């Protein structure tokens, strides 16, 4: 309620008051009228119109309307409708008004609701809808429905039924009864009953009740559709209607909705509406696929029943024929063709028939015809289709890969369109790859008809001595393979030349020998796997001085008397030399070592392959000029005689070696009063590699130290001998015999390649299988110079002295035993066995060798 503003004054005229209104009054019914007075000072309008301030759901049944000016009236709104039986019987409306000066008034209007006789009302289902009652035929008379109605004033009601001719009745209680047993085939199928209910004051209400007679299912339905064959094109979208199948049921011809349709035969392409019988497409139908490609007719068995589970029904077979449409483009398998054609193929040559690989799977011949068009691609002017229908691709031009005008293309990529003749002219593209296959038209050609290579005979094995080269005019160039097909061998080697199969480099596989073969001729072949050609190769072997002179004999021992005449050919000795690559006149002879005092020469010294050993000067042992009784000569024979007229291709020099041992024998004497003593000094020298620079230095330094030690020991031994051994006196001769010293230089370079056991001592010794040299096996014994000393007693002095070999630090007792044995006096020869000085020297030499064999070599087995 709004607040009241200003002074409260009597503004209503006719209020408060009481009025009445009839229930169920419609909207706009006038209930009460009143006026409003305003102050003379106020304008002729009110600020707030009369308003019902205690409005609620019930009081909203009333409203105030203006009658004009300051007159107003209370009217009904119809919402809610006044009901005497359910709503309050009285309403107190608080009405408020305010004029423009602020004066207000509030008064009450009391409205009494009066009762009114109302029409009876139906309750239950009949109050809201038309009731339908189903009665089975053959049902005996019985109550079929109870009508429920009431009077608002609670008065007693009366029920009646129209039309009176229907076989139904209604009782005072409102119960409806059937009065007969219905026959569906004879009686009406439905009845419309008007049910009227009336109150004691004559007010009534009427509702309609529908009664349907339900047929007992004792008849089977039958099809009314006469058509049995239907034709539709393939590829119809799902939902497309094929046929509208209809049927009737004799039990109730006016109720087709009671029939139920179904397809009995299994089918995946169609379905039928069970209530309407409409036959529709349910999935894609492809006429070109199996099984429809062979059998385009689809048979269906349609059944109609008069109930969902009824046993009363009929069946009908229909046939749906699927028509072909042009829905497939022509397909080619493969879609890309790869063909080969030899170069220089003549025009008109057939390459491929595309029709053999393409097809249209549409069934109808009018839909599966196609043509070939649109041949294109780089170089397509060299090819053509015989016709658009045949699809035969042929050559129209000649392609020569070696022709300079040819673009050098070996693969041509062509495209052809294969297209349907029928609308909508579906098409596909075919790719054709044509490879122009090179033809091997040309043989390889060598750059030269023949090749000549000059090679030194000392060229290393494996060296490249030349190259052959061949070309091929074919395009693309063929790979050329080189090989030796004839020649190139000797009696010792099947092939002494090798050629690189890809590069043509010629190498030597064995050492060339000018002395055996001066020229090699062989044939090389160049092949491109189909064609080949050959060329001759001549290898001239250039001579090189690579052979050493070989002389016979290369080792010899001679004995000459000390008084041999100068110029004498010693023992008639002659050396004879040969050289495979040198002229006999190219030899020169040198005595490289051992020719002390130059007693020996060779004659001739050059220009011949034979030479004799000549004594060039006499021996002089008396004055001490000569001291050696044995000469070991090393002779070098070279093939570089400058006076030779032979053409030399190189300045290489080869040298042969010959070793001679010459023993000088002293003059024999008849009266020997003394046996000269010999001091034999044996020097052993190891040969070392010249590249080991430190070896000579170490050996020299060690030798100097050893010689110094040996000299010191010799002095001590000499002093001891003079003290303890007085000289012996030989009557015939007073002079001390002259001592002669023979110095032998032996270079030890022996390789001991075998081992054996000494049968006497049981010790292991090593030996050289070629020379027979032996030594005890002592892995820790170093090889060093040994100074041996022997003293032979003289006939006059009674004793002699030799230098003894210095004892080793490791074996002092053994060395002292050797020295003691060496200093023992030699047995004197008998008078009948007197020795000459030369014989004594030989004996001493032999004894020395035996001593060396006993000390350094094992005993003979």
Image: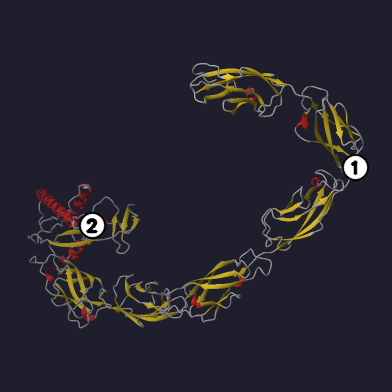
Compared with residue 852, is residue 534 higher up or lower down, i.e. above or below? Answer: below
Front residue (pair 494, 847): 494
Where's the N terminus, which quadrant?
Answer: top right
Circle 2 residues within 10 Å: few <14, some 14–19, many ≥20: some
> Label 1, label 2: how many angstroms apart (C-alpha)?
169 Å
Q: Is residue 617 left or right of residue 229?
A: left
**Disc 1, disc 2: CB below 8 Å?**
no
Residue that label 1 marks: 187
Residue 571 visible in the shown view = yes
| Residue most extreme to the front | 40
Compared with residue 72, is residue 231 higher up or lower down, i.e. above or below? Answer: below
Q: How is the image coloured?
A: secondary structure
Where residue 308 sits, quadrant-wise, is top right
Q: Is residue 523 left or right of residue 245?
A: left
Q: Is residue 349 left or right of residue 26?
A: left
Looking at the rendered structure, which numbered label has been put on residue 708?
none
Front residue (pair 702, 469): 469
Residue that label 2 marks: 851
Helix, strand or loop at label 1? It is loop
Which residue does the image show at 84% across and 36% down from the upper left?
A: 193
Helix, strand or loop at label 2? It is helix
Front residue (pair 4, 72): 72
| Position of residue 675 measured from the top left corner of the image (x, y, whole percent) | 14, 61
Choose mark 1 or mark 2, whichever is in front: 1
| Position of residue 567 measured from the top left corner of the image (x, y, whole percent) | 14, 78
| Position of residue 440 measured from the top left corner of the image (x, y, whole percent) | 46, 78
Where residue 147 sits, quadrant-wise, is top right
Circle 1 residues within 10 Å: few <14, some 14–19, many ≥20: few
Instruction: Give the mark count.
Output: 2
């Amino acid at each position: 309620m709004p607040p009241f503003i200003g002074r409260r004054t009597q503004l209503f005229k006719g209020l408060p008051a009481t009025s009445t209104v009839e229930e169920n009054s419609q909207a706009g019914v006038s209930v009460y009228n009143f006026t409003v007075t305003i102050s003379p000072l106020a304008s002729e309008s009110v600020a707030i119109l009369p308003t019902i301030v205690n409005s609620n759901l019930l009081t909203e049944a009333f409203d105030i309307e203006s009658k004009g000016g300051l007159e107003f009236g209370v009217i009904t709104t119809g919402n809610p409708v006044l009901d005497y039986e359910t709503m309050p019987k009285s309403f107190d409306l608080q009405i408020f008004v305010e004029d423009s000066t602020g004066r207000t008034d509030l008064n009450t209007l009391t409205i009494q609701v009066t009762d009114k006789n109302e029409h009876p009302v139906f309750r239950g289902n009949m109050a809201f809808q038309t009731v339908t009652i189903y009665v089975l035929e053959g049902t005996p008379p019985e109550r079929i429905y109870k009508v429920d109605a009431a009077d608002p004033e609670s008065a007693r009601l009366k029920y009646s039924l129209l039309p009176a001719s229907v076989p139904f009745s209604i009782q005072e209680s409102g119960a409806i009864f059937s009065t007969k047993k219905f026959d569906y085939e004879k009686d009406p199928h439905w009845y419309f009953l008007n049910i009227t209910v009336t109150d004691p004051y004559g007010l009534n209400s009427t509702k309609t009740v529908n009664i349907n007679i339900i047929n007992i299912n004792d008849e089977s339905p039958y099809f009314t559709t006469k058509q049995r064959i239907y034709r539709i094109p393939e590829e119809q979208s799902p939902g497309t209607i094929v046929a509208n199948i209809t049927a009737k049921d004799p039990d109730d011809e006016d109720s087709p909705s009671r029939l139920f349709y179904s397809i009995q035969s299994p089918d995946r392409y169609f379905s039928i509406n069970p209530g309407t019988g409409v036959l529709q497409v349910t999935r894609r139908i492809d006429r070109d696929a199996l099984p429809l490609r062979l059998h385009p007719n689809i048979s269906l068995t349609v059944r109609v029943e008069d109930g969902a589970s009824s046993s009363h029904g009929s069946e009908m077979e229909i046939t749906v024929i699927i028509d072909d449409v042009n829905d497939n483009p022509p397909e080619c398998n493969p879609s890309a063709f790869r063909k080969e054609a030899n170069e220089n193929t003549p025009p008109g040559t057939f390459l491929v028939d595309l029709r053999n690989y393409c097809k249209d799977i549409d069934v109808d011949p009018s839909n599966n015809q196609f043509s070939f068009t649109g041949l294109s691609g780089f170089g397509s002017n060299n090819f053509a289709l015989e016709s658009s229908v045949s699809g035969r691709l042929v050559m129209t031009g000649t392609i020569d890969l070696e022709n300079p005008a040819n673009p050098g293309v070996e693969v041509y990529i062509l495209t052809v369109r294969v297209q349907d003749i029928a609308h909508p002219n579906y098409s596909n593209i075919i790719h054709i790859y044509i490879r122009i296959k090179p033809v091997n038209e040309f043989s390889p050609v060598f750059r030269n008809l023949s090749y000549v290579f000059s090679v030194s005979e000392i060229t290393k094995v494996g060296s490249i001595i030349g190259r052959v080269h061949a070309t091929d005019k074919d395009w693309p160039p063929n790979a050329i393979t080189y090989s030796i097909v004839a020649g190139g061998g000797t009696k010792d080697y099947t092939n002494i030349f090798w050629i690189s199969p890809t590069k043509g480099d010629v190498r030597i596989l064995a050492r060339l020998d000018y002395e055996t073969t001066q020229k090699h001729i062989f044939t090389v072949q160049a092949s491109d796997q189909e064609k080949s050609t050959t060329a001759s190769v001549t290898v001239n072997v250039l001579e090189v001085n690579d052979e050493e002179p070989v002389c016979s004999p290369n080792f010899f021992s001679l004995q000459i008397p000390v008084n041999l005449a100068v110029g004498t050919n010693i023992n008639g000795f002659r050396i004879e030399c040969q050289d495979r690559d040198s002229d006999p006149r190219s030899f020169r002879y040198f005595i490289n070592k051992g020719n002390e005092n130059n007693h020996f020469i060779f004659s001739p010294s050059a220009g011949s392959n034979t030479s004799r050993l000549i004594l060039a000067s006499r021996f002089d042992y008396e004055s001490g000029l000569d001291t050696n009784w044995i000469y070991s000569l090393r002779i070098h024979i070279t093939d570089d005689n400058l006076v030779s007229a032979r053409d030399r291709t190189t300045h290489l020099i080869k040298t042969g070696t010959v070793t001679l041992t010459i023993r000088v024998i002293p003059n024999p004497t008849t009266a020997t009063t003394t046996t000269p003593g010999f001091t034999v000094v044996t020097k052993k020298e190891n040969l070392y590699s010249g590249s080991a620079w430190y070896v000579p230095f170490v050996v020299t330094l060690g030798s100097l130290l050893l010689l110094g030690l040996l000299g010191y020991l010799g002095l001590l031994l000499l002093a001891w001998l003079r003290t303890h051994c007085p000289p012996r006196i030989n009557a015939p001769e007073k002079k001390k015999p002259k001592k002669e010293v023979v110095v032998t230089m032996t270079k030890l370079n022996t390789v001991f390649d075998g081992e054996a056991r000494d049968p006497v001592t049981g010790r292991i010794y090593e030996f050289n299988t070629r020379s027979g040299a032996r030594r005890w096996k002592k892995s820790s014994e170093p090889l060093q110079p040994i100074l041996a000393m022997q003293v032979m007693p003289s006939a006059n002095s009674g004793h002699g002295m030799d230098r003894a070999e210095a004892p080793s630090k490791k074996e002092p007792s053994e060395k002292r035993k050797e020295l003691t044995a060496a200093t023992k006096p030699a047995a004197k020869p008998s008078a009948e066995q007197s020795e000459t000085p030369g014989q004594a020297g030989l004996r001493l030499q032999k004894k020395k060798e035996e001593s060396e064999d006993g000390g350094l070599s094992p005993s003979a087995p």
